[in-house]
Structure formats: structure tokens, C-alpha cells
Image: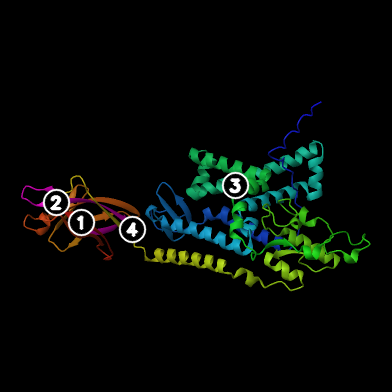
Amino acid sequence: MTQSPASPPPLYAPREPIFPRRVKGTYRTLKWWIMGVTLAIYYLTPWIRWDRGPNLPDQAVLVDLAGRRFYFFWIEIWPHEFYFVAGLLIMAGLGLFLFTSALGRVWCGYTCPQTVWTDLFILVERWIEGDRNARVRLWNADWSFHKVRLRMTKFIVWFFIALATGGAWVFYFADAPTLARDLVTFDAPLVAYSTMLILTATTFVFGGFMREQVCNYMCPWPRIQAAMMDESTLTVAYRHWRGEPRGKHMKAEDADQRGDCIDCMACVNVCPAGIDIRDGQQMECITCALCIDACDEVMERIGKPRGLIDYLALSDEEAETKGAPPRPILEHVLRPRTILYTAMWSLIGVALVYALFIRSDIDLTVEPVRNPQFVTLSDGAVRNAYTLRIRNLTAEPREFRVMLTSDDILRIDVESDGAVANHVTVPANETMQARVYVTARPQDPAADAETTDLRLWVEDVETDDRAGVATIFNGKG
């Protein structure tokens, strides 16, 4: 009789619900403060006002897609200055590399939006359903009016938090008070409602239900972090040489031969990822350090030294096993890798600040007309046409004088609004386009030469601020 082959194991294991226990301690307090500060920044920043003058938005932080501007307090970024945004993104990446190489996944454990909102949702869940044991009992209980009432109350609070999250995001892209009024009166654009709906749904699902699964399956950083860390990186770890063999001291006959770990599972019960840090480094660990607080509390209760679970480096294991004291934190943090990241981060930051302070209030681009490259007039003169785009980066209209410099004698005429002159007025915070004609007389060398170098200038009539662009004059040669 043939035996049927065993069915293959499932590709995906079903999620085991995690109910973190409440814990008090240094790192939990630090996480509360970081959560409060980051949430306050996110929700309140769009409502900060900043006076930029007439005809300009008075919102301190605004991504004005319609006007193609990014406002950040006194800084105004135009589309052609996107290198500032690119530089900030590079600095953010280098900063992430720096902190990971020095302290492991501290970004994930303290400031990642998924961690912050998950902490907030768990806090609401604890307020409504109780601490860990009460939530476990409620999860395993049969459905009843009491269970439905608690679940619905929790879901409603979650929904309003998620709605506030989606609403705060759209306020960064329009005037917050105006958009809030339009949202309430249903006069806001459809894209605002659709964006809020998407962000509300993702916040509700990610923070309320998926939680650690977002970190384990959706985020690439747990898989990349290994390249940023080495044996000197400080990360949350268990001193197994001190804690093993573990066991209940009071009930064991060989209690004096056991390690400090009493196998109380406190570190597991407070972990938002549901892992056991005593099993060693794991991809799921976000370095939130709540297990350190839980273990320190137990160690104090049983009269043992704190630090059984602590921020450790693999390079310390051999020395500490032989009884040596832990190495100073600075020896772990100040290493060639972290110094290199810090230097690169600082250089980019200094370059961006320098570029920000030296940028001019005038921006000029010159585009020669290529078809035709030149026109021969009835008197034999040769004329080239150029398209000038003048950006006025100030809050007031400015009148500019258009000029040229060249080794040859050339004449310049500016066509603006149908009139020919050598002055143009550019409105505040706008770009104006003007057509410029440069002419060489028949007897001038530039008329017969193949090309002649020249530079077109715009000069503010009142302040004498200038901006110039080099170009060429095409002759008959």
C-alpha cells in the first residue's frame, strides 16, 4: 500500500497576534517624548504662519505644486533649484547609514513613522481594552456585546487618528485653513479627498493590524542594515555569558550555579515584534530597547545588576566573557566608518548652506533661436534672435535693463509685450520671457565671422544686481 506524500508546508505562516505589555523605563520614556515631538511636528506644522509679503502664501511650510514652489519658512525653492531637495535626500540617506553603523536600527525603533503610529495605536488599544493579559483574554473570548463594544470603540478612535493623519498630509500642499474649510463644506478638489482616503486607509491598516508585518515583509531596510553594521556596532543584545544557564532561582536546587536570567519572559512580552532577544540578533528586531527596560526592572527586583540586556557590540563579547568591563560608548561610535559618514554628511550640508546663501535673486537663461541661426537684413546686416527667461526671485516687481558685452560692435533690441526697448519689468516671484535681437552691421567683423562670443546681461535698474549668460553670435562665415 503506497503512502501519500506529505503535503508541503505553507509558504506563509499565519500571523500570530502580538500584545506588548506596558513597561516603564528610560527607553520607554524616550520613545514617548520622541513620539510626542514627531506627531506634534507632523500635525501642527501646516498651521504655522509666515509673512512673506503681498501675493505670496503665508504658510511656513508649503509644497505649492500649482505655483511650482517649495516654501520652508524663509527659504523658497524653485523648480530649477531641485538640487537642494536632492541634497537633503542624500543627507537623509547618509544620516541613516551613520546612525545604523553606530547604533543599529535606532531609526526604526524610535522615529520611523510606522513605529510612531503603531505605538500610538497600541496606546489607544491599551487604554480601551486593558494591558496585555486583558487583551489576550479579550482576543480569545467568544464574541459578545462587551467585546464588540470595546472593538468598535477602538476602531473608531483609530479611524479618527488615521483621518487626522491623512488630513494633515494634504495640508502641506495647500493653505491649511482654506483647505480645511473647503473639506468641511465639500468644496475641496477631488484629489484632496482621494489622498486623504488613501492615507487614512493605509494608516488604519498598517498601524492597527499589520504593525510588525510592515517592517518584516514590506520594508527593505531590515535586509539592507546588515551592510551598514559590523562587529563594533552598538545594538540591543543579551549577555548570554552572564544570563545562562537561565531558570527560576527560588525553585532550583542549583540556584547558585545558574545565570542571572530567571526566564521570566518579560523581554518577550514587551517586544512589539514578538521576538526573544535572548536568541541572538534577528532581522525582526527594531532596536526599540523596551526589552532593556523590562529586564532592568526585573534585575532590580531580584537584586541583580542591570544590563543583562543592553546596547552591546559583538566585539565586546570575548572581553566581557573574560570579566573585562564594557568598552566606552565613544570607542564604538567613533570609528573610521562613522567618521567617514559624518564627514560626507557635513560636506554636503555645508555645500547646500553655501549654495543657499550665494544664490542670486535673479536667474537668467538664454536660448538662441536655431531655425534660422541668423537672418540677413535688407541693408546687409546680420541678426540673431535669442529667447531670454528672467526669473525674479523676490517679492516685489523689478525692472531690468538688458545689455550685452562682446569684443565686437553689436546692437541689442529687446521685444517685450510687442514693444521694442531695452528694459523689461518682471512681476514678483515670476518668470518672464522676452525675445532679444542682436544685430551686426555689414562692415562689422561679426557679420562675416562664423561665430562671435558674447554675453547677455540683465541688470536691476534700482539695485544694479546683475546676472549674465555666455552665448555666441552666428555670422555668415
Q: Earlier in the sequence, mark 2 or mark 3?
A: 3
Q: Earlier in the sequence, mark 4 or mark 2?
A: 2
Residue range corresponding to the magenta coloring: 374-403
Residue 151 in picture, x, y percent from top left: 74, 41
Q: Quadrant of residue 104?
A: bottom right
Q: Residue at x 73, y 54 (%)?
A: 271
Q: Mark 2 is on which residue type?
A: Arg
Q: Earlier in the sequence, mark 2 or mark 1?
A: 2
Residue extending farthest top:
1
Magenta run includes residue 395? yes
| SS type, badge 3 | helix
Residue assigned mark 4: 396
Q: Residue at x 90, y 64 (%)?
A: 255
Can you tell which of label 1 and label 4 is closer to the viewer?
1
Residue 324 in picture, x, y percent from top left: 74, 74
| SS type, badge 2 | strand
Can you tell which of label 1 and label 3 is closer to the viewer?
1
CA distance separating discs 2 and 3: 61 Å
Residue assigned mark 3: 164
Residue 383 badge = 2
Magenta run includes residue 61? no
Q: Mark 4 is on which residue type?
A: Glu
Residue 472 badge = 1
CA distance separating discs 4 and 3: 37 Å
Residue 252 in picture, x, y percent from top left: 92, 60
Can you tell which of label 2 and label 3 is closer to the viewer?
2
Q: Earlier in the sequence, mark 1 or mark 3?
A: 3
| SS type, badge 1 | strand
CA distance separating discs 1 and 3: 56 Å
Residue 178 badge = none
CA distance separating discs 1 and 4: 32 Å
